[in-house]
């Protein structure tokens, strides 16, 4: 123990000497070290005033003292000794030994050069040498980028560096270090053939910014369209769009590519064609929509909409009625959009939701629900149906939206519901059967909130039971499930709904009926379980495996003679989909 303590003390002492020595050797301003000011500058949480304060402090120091220290930071790396020292510090629980790692110091070095800008020019020679150091090359090129024009020659060397990250930074950095755009483009054009995809991507992107020199950039971007990577080719097409009519020489190549590439890249190609020559693009797009492959349909329609929206909408609706399943499937991505929906789009989606192809129907149904959810997220008004009551100036819909996590209303909300006139029960029943008026689909959030309110009202819900029982015949899962769930607030009077639940055509409803009968709720009505025994026995042969398993487990609870009583089931209500 004594030996370990001594080793720990020596390590701590060594670390303190190292840290204090390092701090004392730094230039200072207003009593604070360079490192302290750089930490302030690099802190993402500081406001502009403190950022400016740190910049001013670093610039106020003598550059002849600051630059050597910044170069020291840039060249730091975690040595074996430091790694060993840090391990020992953690072993002996000496927090002061942990220190700053190399990455952090290097970032501070870059930050210091960034503050100095062109005043960091005296460091270019050393930074140029560091480009040959694989451990410091990336940091060095980042510093050269901050120095700008005085680092032009060194940055040119970076274009052929063995490290692709250095080449990538050099491509963008030279834009700020080179005055002549022709010279700049001549320097970076070979990076379009770089072995690293990310360098080629960066080169394409910066060429796209040279819209003031289309005669130089466009030919290079046309060659990039032929890149073996289709995503880079698509990026080249997108950047050509920014040149507009000045990229007319690219149009024939884009037309050829439109017939040979995948859906994503094809979209970029078609959009570029439209941006470059709208008039010449329209007949090509129309032909793709009418007689091209199905997988070209959506891209062509979306590109066409920017120049001929009415024609695009007409052809979209025609494709939605196509006899070809694939075309009906692909056009769904065009029908999916935020409001306002063009005329006929909602009807087309409703028809697609009932399509003979299950895949088309499922996708259309998903899109309809997405549209409805986006509407809810965008709207600020509360749903209010005709003749609904209110209380204390708040509508029924506003009160129902106060449902808490866990599926319960506050005492204040339940009291408000009880204080409303007798219209509240039929209004809640109408909400349990609510369907979106445009698409005709049930809204699970509206339905679920109303059902939970009926449960909370208890015996006041009795007049609603005939309607709730009738809703159990619905072919829609949410309506039947929530109608059954809403009835349990009436106690044993809910039996007709639960019986209908056990014999419902929807497996989820049958399963939920079993859960309710064997949940904590039913412990107050022990006779209900035995009354349900014949139906549960029938469910042992149910076509749905989950229902069979639940029925068998429930009968075990009834019949197991030597088994300890199972823990009470906690009633689980259907999930209410929340839009916000």
Image (cartoon, rainbow, N blue to C red):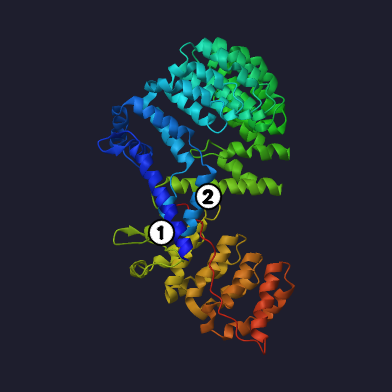
Question: Which x, y percent locates residue 446?
Answer: 47, 58
Q: Quadrant of residue 551?
A: bottom right
- Residue 303: percent from the left, percent from the top? 59, 27
Residue 574 x %, y % = 54, 64
Among the two numbered marks 2 and 1 on one chain, the one whose residue lies closer to the N terminus = 2
The crowd level at tag 1 (other Cα within 10 Å; few <14, some 14-19, many 20+) is some
Circle 1: element type: loop
Give SS at disc 2: helix
Q: What is the residue that sits farthest to the bottom in this orientation?
A: 562
Q: Is residue 437 in view from this perspective?
A: no
Residue drawn at 47 percent across, 46 percent down: 375
- The Cα atoms of the two marked residues, 2 and 1, are separated by 59 Å
Is residue 499 something that shows in the picture?
A: yes
| Residue density around tag 2, few if under 14, some if 14–19, many if 20 or more, within 10 Å | few
Q: Which residue is mark 2?
A: 84
Q: Extreme left residue here? A: 30
Residue at the (51%, 72%) spot, across then down? 487
Q: On the picture, is 154 further left or further right than 409?
A: right
Q: Nearer the viewer, residue 281 or 202?
A: 202
Quarter residue 420 falls in: bottom left
| Position in image of residue 165 (x %, y %) | 57, 30
Q: What label does residue 401 carry, if any?
A: 1
Q: Residue at x 55, y 27 (%)?
A: 166
Describe residue 30's horizontal placement relative to residue 18 as left or right. Answer: left
Residue 63's place in the image compared with 454, above or below, is above
């Amino acid at each position: 123990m004594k030996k370990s303590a001594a080793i720990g003390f020596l390590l701590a002492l060594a670390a303190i000497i190292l840290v204090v020595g390092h701090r004392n050797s730094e230039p200072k301003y207003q009593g604070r070290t360079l490192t302290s000011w750089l930490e302030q500058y690099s802190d993402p949480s500081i406001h502009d005033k403190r950022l400016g304060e740190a910049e001013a402090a670093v610039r106020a120091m003598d550059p002849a003292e600051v630059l050597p220290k910044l170069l020291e930071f840039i060249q730091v790396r975690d040595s074996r000794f430091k790694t060993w020292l840090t391990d020992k510090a953690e072993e002996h629980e000496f927090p002061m030994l942990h220190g700053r790692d190399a990455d952090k110091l290097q970032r501070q070095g870059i930050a210091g050069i960034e503050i100095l800008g062109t005043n960091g020019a005296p460091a270019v020679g050393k930074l140029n040498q560091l480009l040959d150091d694989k451990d410091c090359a990336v940091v060095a090129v980042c510093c050269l980028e901050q120095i700008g024009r005085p680092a032009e020659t060194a940055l040119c060397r970076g274009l052929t560096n063995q490290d692709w990250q250095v080449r990538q930074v050099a491509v963008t950095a030279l834009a700020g270090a080179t005055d002549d755009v022709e010279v700049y483009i001549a320097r970076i054009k070979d990076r379009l053939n770089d072995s690293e995809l990310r360098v080629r991507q960066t080169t394409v992107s910066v060429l796209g910014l040279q819209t003031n020199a289309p005669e130089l950039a466009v030919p290079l971007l046309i060659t990039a369209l032929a890149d073996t990577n289709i995503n880079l080719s698509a990026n080249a097409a997108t950047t050509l769009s920014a040149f507009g009519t000045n990229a007319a020489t690219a149009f024939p190549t884009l037309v050829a590519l439109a017939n040979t590439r995948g859906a994503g890249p094809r979209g970029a190609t078609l959009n570029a064609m439209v941006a470059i020559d709208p008039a010449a693009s329209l007949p090509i797009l129309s032909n793709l929509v009418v007689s091209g492959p199905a997988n070209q349909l959506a891209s062509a329609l979306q590109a066409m909409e920017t120049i001929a929206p009415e024609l695009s909408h007409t052809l979209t609706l025609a494709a939605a009625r196509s006899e070809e399943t694939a075309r009906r499937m692909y056009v769904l991505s065009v029908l999916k959009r935020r409001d306002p929906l063009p005329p006929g789009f909602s009807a087309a989606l409703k028809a697609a939701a009932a399509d003979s192809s299950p895949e088309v129907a499922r996708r259309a149904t998903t899109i309809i629900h997405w549209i409805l959810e986006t509407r809810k997220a965008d709207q600020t008004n509360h749903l209010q149906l005709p003749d609904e009551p209110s209380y204390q100036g708040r509508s029924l819909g506003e009160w129902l939206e106060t449902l808490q996590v866990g599926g319960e209303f506050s005492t204040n909300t339940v009291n408000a519901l009880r204080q409303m006139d007798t219209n509240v029960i039929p209004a809640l029943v109408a909400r349990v059967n609510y369907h979106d008026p445009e698409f005709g689909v049930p809204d699970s959030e509206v339905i679920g909130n109303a059902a939970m309110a009926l449960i909370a009202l208890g015996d006041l819900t009795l007049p609603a039971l005939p309607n709730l029982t009738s809703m159990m015949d619905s072919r829609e899962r949410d309506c039947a499930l929530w109608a059954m769930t809403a009835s349990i607030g009436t106690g044993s009077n809910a039996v007709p709904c639960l019986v209908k639940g056990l014999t419902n055509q929807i497996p989820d409803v049958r399963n939920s009926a079993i859960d309710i009968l064997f949940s904590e709720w039913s412990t107050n009505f022990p006779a209900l379980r035995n009354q349900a025994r014949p139906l549960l026995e029938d469910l042992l042969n149910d076509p749905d495996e989950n229902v069979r398993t639940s029925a068998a487990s429930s009968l075990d609870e009834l019949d197991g003679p030597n088994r300890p009583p199972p823990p009470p089931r906690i009633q689980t209500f259907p999930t209410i989909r929340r839009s916000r």
